[in-house]
Amino acid sequence: MDRLRLMETFVRVVETGNFSAVARQAHTTQSAISKQVQALEADVGVLLLVRSTRSHSLTEAGRLYYQRCRQVLDTLEEARSEVHRAEHEVSGLLRVAAPVAFGRIHIVPRLAAFYARYPKMRIDLQLDDSFVDLVAAGIDVAFRVGELKDSRLIARRIGSVARAVIVSSSYLARHGAPQKPDDLSEHNCLLYTGIDNFNEWTFYGSKDKAITVRVGSNFQSNSSEAIRQGVLEGLGICYSPTWIYGRDIREGSVNTILNNYKPSTLPLNVVYQPERRPSIKISSFVDFFTEAFNQDPDLSTAIRSYKA
């Protein structure tokens, strides 16, 4: 028995004043509506309506039951409206994870514009260069730079991150510049350990032939911020995403070298928990930042958009 449907029929009968009007609205017969009210009376065990040839009236129990039914149906309608608004209005808390440098350089500076567009949104940004466990940390969406390691996650690729070989002028003054990728084996190469095969740097030369060089270092770190600072201090050469060094390159603090060789790119993805389909607030957040990334001069050559 669909008790809720019977309650709705009973309320409509009371409020319209007759069975035939409810039958027309429901595209059924007056007899079917009468049977539904009778089934409800059998369920509650009391007479709700007193019928006569041309009209009906509520019993005392029927009047009380009608009031309760009206309250239940109103509460359900309010709940339905609230859920609909939550699903179709960009509002609420969004928990986001991203690598430290990526969040500092490319997410936080854009939050003011994001809030101007979506003033009812709240962001909890967790910055970590390691791959955060989305389920354990309660993360709604995460930006991932590099190959994905967790196949359980739902991923949407939004671009590819370009890399370059970057070094300070002070290092070049002391050690000179490598002329080809193989020369890197004679230099101190600062290693970011947050990706697989971090000590193997791949380039593409003429005819897109891959050249992979195994490099060595006296300094490595799981923090891209630490590697950047090491480069600025003249400790060695790095093989890094260009967006980390956009301002440094423009100000002349660092140089890109081996520009005749194209370093391999890194995929940029957003990922979600497998049991959570992207809500409107997640989709709005990701779409906003993907659009912003493609308009950024430091990312315009580093990010190539992909459709979901």
Image (tube, helix red, strand yellow):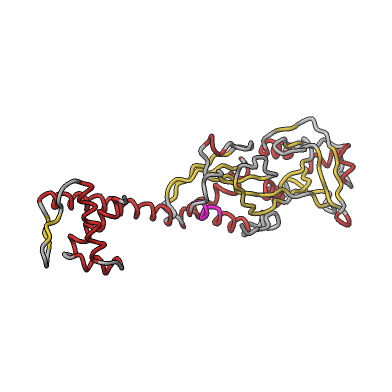
| Position above or below: 215 against 15 | above
Vertical relation: 46 (above or below) 288: above
Image quarter for residue 299? bottom right
Provide residue 220's location: percent of width, then percent of height: 74, 32
Vertical side of 239 occupied by 63: above or below: below
Residue 171 forms part of the magenta stretch = no
Left-right relation of 9 to 91: left
From the image, give the main secondary structure of the stretch colored magenta.
helix
Residue 283 part of the magenta segment: yes
Residue stretch in magenta = 282-286
Q: Is residue 238 visible?
A: yes
Residue 275 appears at what percent x and percent y? 53, 44
Left or right for 107, reference 234:
left
Q: Between residues 199 and 49, which one lies in front from this camera angle?
A: 49
Identify the residue shown where x is 70% and y is 40%. 228
Towards the viewer: 177 or 77:
77
Q: In the rendered image, is residue 168 in sight?
A: no
Residue 82: x percent and y percent?
35, 52
Instruction: Give me the residue at 81% from left, 52% from top.
Output: 262
Nearer to the camera, 290 or 23: 23
The residue lying toward the viewer, choosing from 63 and 187, is 63
Q: Position of residue 55 (x, y in %)?
A: 12, 65
Total residue callouts: 0
Q: In which quadrant is the C terminus drawn?
A: bottom right
